[in-house]
Image (cartoon, rainbow, N blue to C red):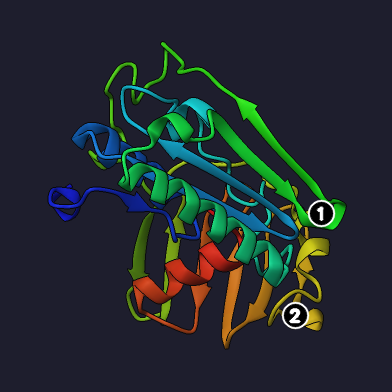
Amino acid sequence: RGLIEDVDLVIDGTDNFETRYLLNDACVDAGRPWVYGGVVASHGMVLAVVPGQTPCFACVVPEMPAPGSTGTCDTAGVIGPAVGVVAALEAVEAMKLLVGARESLARGLITVDLWRHQYRTFELDRNPDCAVCGAGEYRFLRGEVTSTSIALCGRNAVQVTPGQPGSIDLDRFAEQLAGRGAVRNQSVRANAYLLRFEADALECTLFPDGRAVIKGTDEVERARAFYAKYIGS
């Protein structure tokens, strides 16, 4: 919260849902506008949030997607032009906020699909029952919903437990992983109980509820970055 006390605007450049929910909590609590932007494959979304006036991020996405339920840049890929377009749209919305032209903001969620040349704006209203801008619960800001990571003593491994447990189809997820990013194809193995794969000089054992043991490091931040990169959050 202290990081945004002296700023006029926050622009999203993050790569995971957990951080975005935290940003949304902090900005709504502090009354600071922020601009969300996300890209995967050829798709992108942009949302300008003005606390008290427009829908917040939690109005649009009330619950954090379960681990493995959405693609990441490394599992689904991303095309460079989509990144550029979303960044440009974020910048335009940010400029409107900074110069006081709030009446010109897109009144809802901007979506783009560059591959199909589709550009849409979905007009949205604030959700009066929103847990964040409606009820002021701020669960992410208070640390009530967050993933946990624990270095496993003597095993050169870190266990990552998501804040929102999932139900991952391990066979389907194994198909998505094969040949993506730095994942070694021959290392991808799955059964009814776990999925194991290797990438970036680390070995990951993933369980259906989203828990993962990442072997080859005892650095929590490296393990969390690996999890966000290949599994999502």
Left or right: where 29 falls relative to 175? left
> Which residue is at a point 25% across and 39% down the rendered structure image?
32
Q: How many numbered discs sit on the rendered protein?
A: 2
Left or right: where 181 falls relative to 126? right
Check disc 1 and report the residue beneath it.
Answer: 172
Image mark for residue 187: 2
Left or right: where 106 falls relative to 190? left
Q: What is the crowding at mark 2: few (fewer than 14 residues within 10 Å), some, or many (at least 20)?
A: some
Q: Residue furthest right?
A: 116
Kind of residue at badge 2: Ser
Secondary structure under tag 2 reads helix
The part of the image, by quadrant, that contains residue 149 is bottom left
Say if residue 210 shows up in the picture. Answer: yes
Say if residue 17 shows up in the picture. Answer: no
Q: Where residue 212 sits: x, y (%)?
A: 53, 61
Q: Where residue 96 sits: x, y (%)?
A: 41, 44
Residue toward you, 30 or 9: 9
Please identify, in this view, whether the residue under mark 2 or under mark 1 is nearer the observer: 1
